[in-house]
Amino acid sequence: MIVRKPEDVTASVLEVMERTADPRLREIMVCLARHLHGFVREVNLTEAEYRQAAALLADLGKQTTDTHNEVVLMGGSLGLSALVCLLNNGDHGRAETSQNLLGPFWRLNSPPMDNGDSIVRSETPGPVLFVDARVQDRAGAPVAGARVDIWHSSPVGYYENQDETQADMNLRGTFTTDDDGRVWFRTVKPAGYPIPTDGVVGRLLAAQNRHPYRPAHLHALIYKPGFKTLTSQVYVDDDQYLETDVQFGVTRALVGEYRRREGPHPTAADIAAPWYSLDYVFTMEPGEARLPMPPIK
Ligand code: BEZ
Ligand code: FE
């Protein structure tokens, strides 16, 4: 089509997109073209702004390396990761789900542990936390023999791979659920932490006067054939950033009750008060048991 007016460009592009052979790709490309053209019209995008946007996308790519993904960080900072997660789990967003963001700190081969073990592998000052978790299916029946891979930041907000003072695999470990679907272990209470702000995402946050923090959380990746692999986070209920997570990841279902205990621990005399306990129930959904690509190589 030879273009005479702006609407002709959109019509012409849509006609080409409609010729995409793969039906799903066709659906996506037609819709994307419609929304992109509509967006440019709605905001009256200027030529300078279009150049700026192109440079920004190029920068997202340039700032992405083997160990850092600025594109995913931007997706999270725009709420896209959270939205895609909620629309694809919990009966397509109609029911509560334990699914949440994977984040960039999951590592393959976290050490196998026995229930009752501690995942503190080097001196890590901070309040002791006892976790007792149960894994169930949608009907509430226990899921026995599931692998529960746990990882979290230290009480000052660093994962072990970001912090020379922590031993390799500190605050990481993989447990197996017993016949009642339970795992239990000892650790220390995690703290929230800022996402990196030295790239395009940092510029966005500054322009919007947003803080860069994620509220404190405990990650779990739960795997058992016959279920969709569960990527979850249990957020700390007394965290100041619970309502304003920079990645929009906090859902009502994933706020855990981290109970603060002032008295002595009933069995371990070495534990100083306050210490914490967390009881939490994860619900697995039907689907494919597939491990994600490890963000850390
Ligand atoms: C995390 O939970 O580890 C995380 C998720 C998204 C962006 C950054 C960190
Ligand atoms: Fe995290």
Image (cartoon, rainbow, N blue to C red):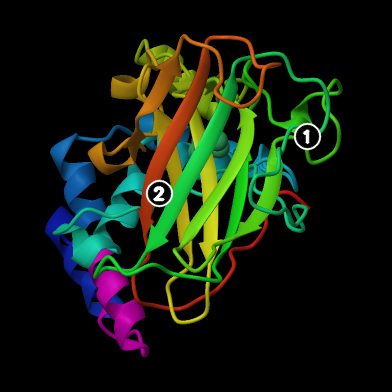
Which stretch is magenta?
Answer: 18-32
Query: As rendered, which of 237 and 56 lies closer to the eye?
Result: 237
Residue at 74%, 53% (x, y): give it: 110
Across and down, in percent, residue 174 comes to 67, 54
Dot placed on the residue nearer the N-terminal end, 1 or 2: 2
Q: Relative to 251, is 214 above or below?
A: above
**Disc 2 C-beta below 8 A from ligand 1:** no
Magenta highlight on residue 26: yes
Q: Is residue 284 left or right of residue 102?
A: left
The amino acid at mark 2 is Asn
Question: Residue 197's spot in the image, x, y percent?
Answer: 57, 20
In this picture, residue 178 sits left or right of residue 284: right
> Of the numbered discs in the image, which one, if any, rests on residue 100?
2
Q: Give the residue at mark 1.
A: 161
Q: CA distance from mark 1 to mark 2?
A: 22 Å
Where on the image, by quarter, is ligand 2? top right
The question of residue 273 being in magenta is answered with: no
Q: Nearer the viewer, residue 58 or 218?
A: 218
Q: Residue at x 78, y 34 (%)?
A: 161
The quarter of the rendered structure image containing the N terminus is: bottom left
| Rendered location of residue 218, percent (x, y) | 52, 37
- Asked if 36 appears above or below 180 in the picture, the reply is above
Q: Main secondary structure of the magenta part?
A: helix
Vertically, is 17 above or below 113?
Answer: below
Residue 141 visible in this rendered orientation of the protein: yes
**Residue type at mark 1?**
Asn
Residue at the spot 17% in from the left edge and 58% down from the top edge: 95
Q: Is mark 1 within 8 Å of ligand 1?
A: no
Extreme residue toward the bottom, this view? 21
Q: In which quarter of the view is residue 273 placed?
A: top right
Disc 2 on helix, strand or loop? loop
